[in-house]
Image (spheres, rainbow, N blue to C red):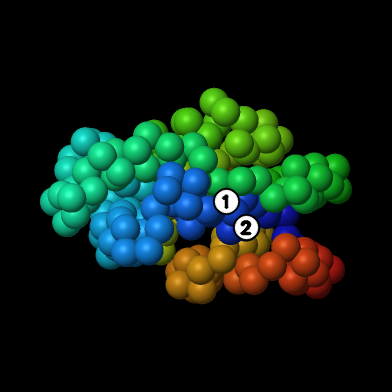
Amino acid sequence: MMKNIIFDIGNVLASFRWKALFQELGFTGEKFDRIAAATVLHPTMWNEFDRSLMRDEEIISCCIEREPEYEADIRRLFASTAELVEEYSYSFAWIKELKDRGYRVYLLSNYGKTSFEAAREKNKLSFLPLVDGAVISYEVQMVKPEAGIYKALLEKYKLAAEECVFLDDKPENVAAAQRLGFHGIVVESGEQARKTLEEKLQN
């Protein structure tokens, strides 16, 4: 029996709008591509930002080493990380509805300490007070799809994986959860995710 709904945040409950933020910061053309490759699309650095084992300044310095010409712009980006997310219009109501129906709702998300705290302070994620708990990557210094972060959620809240359904936009993250016994949904759109979740809850 399904009792617990586990949500990722980025591209599930809130848009990870890095392209829009780049445009707002005036990054266009070659600058856009080069800064993206050095930051949000970097093969390791953005994961390290989410892990928060390294200090922010170390991570920023590593990104700047790749593109020293754009040091000022990279620093502006990291100073603006609260703006990287925009909550979807349906997220608050969806979580409230699930809660009203008796389900427990948790968050399991890759999110850097600085950016998460900034988003919370600016009320970018209005649904946070609704959830029953959360494990955010910076808190445990692990990132999805590493098995440890899923186990941390189960252990922290004494959950049984087979009673949990996990929703994430990345197939590899859902697959990692399924290997541990979670039910999983790869989110492609809000409508698709809601429909698929309802099907799983009815079974």
Where residue 137 appears, x then y in whole percent? 41, 46
* Residue at the spot 23% in from the left edge and 48% down from the top edge: 70
Are circles 2 and 1 on residues that touch, CB within 8 Å? yes
* Residue at the spot 45% in from the left edge and 72% down from the top edge: 172
For the residue labelled by badge 2, is the local secondary structure a helix, a strand or a loop?
loop
Does 42 appear above or below 22?
Answer: below
Does 41 appear above or below 203?
Answer: above
Where residue 46 appears, x then y in whole percent? 32, 53
Task: Work out which quarter of the rendered image holds the N terminus and state it.
Answer: bottom right
In the displayed structure, does residue 1 sit left or right of residue 23?
right
Q: Residue furthest top?
A: 121
Where residue 99 appears, x then y in whole percent? 79, 43
Where residue 91 appears, x then y in whole percent? 73, 48
How far apart marks 2 and 1 lie (CA) works out to 5 Å
Q: Confirm whether residue 180 shows in the render.
A: no
> Which residue is the site of mark 1?
9
Task: Work out which quarter of the rendered image holds the C terminus and state it.
Answer: bottom right
- Image quadrant in which you'd find residue 36: bottom left
For the residue labelled by badge 1, is the local secondary structure a helix, a strand or a loop?
loop
- Residue kind at label 2, given as amino acid type: Val
Nearer to me, 151 or 50 = 50
- Residue kind at label 1, given as amino acid type: Ile
- In the rendered structure, find residue 12 and report the number of the disc placed on it: 2
Crowd tier of the residue under label 2, counting other residues whose Cα lies within 10 Å: few below 14, some 14–19, many 20 or above: many
- Image quadrant in which you'd find residue 7: bottom right
Nearer to me, 95 or 147 = 95
Crowd tier of the residue under label 1, counting other residues whose Cα lies within 10 Å: few below 14, some 14–19, many 20 or above: many
* Residue at the spot 85% in from the left edge and 42% down from the top edge: 100
- In the rendered structure, find residue 70 and report the number of the disc placed on it: none
Nearer to me, 102 or 72 = 72
* Residue at the spot 37% in from the left edge and 42% down from the top edge: 77
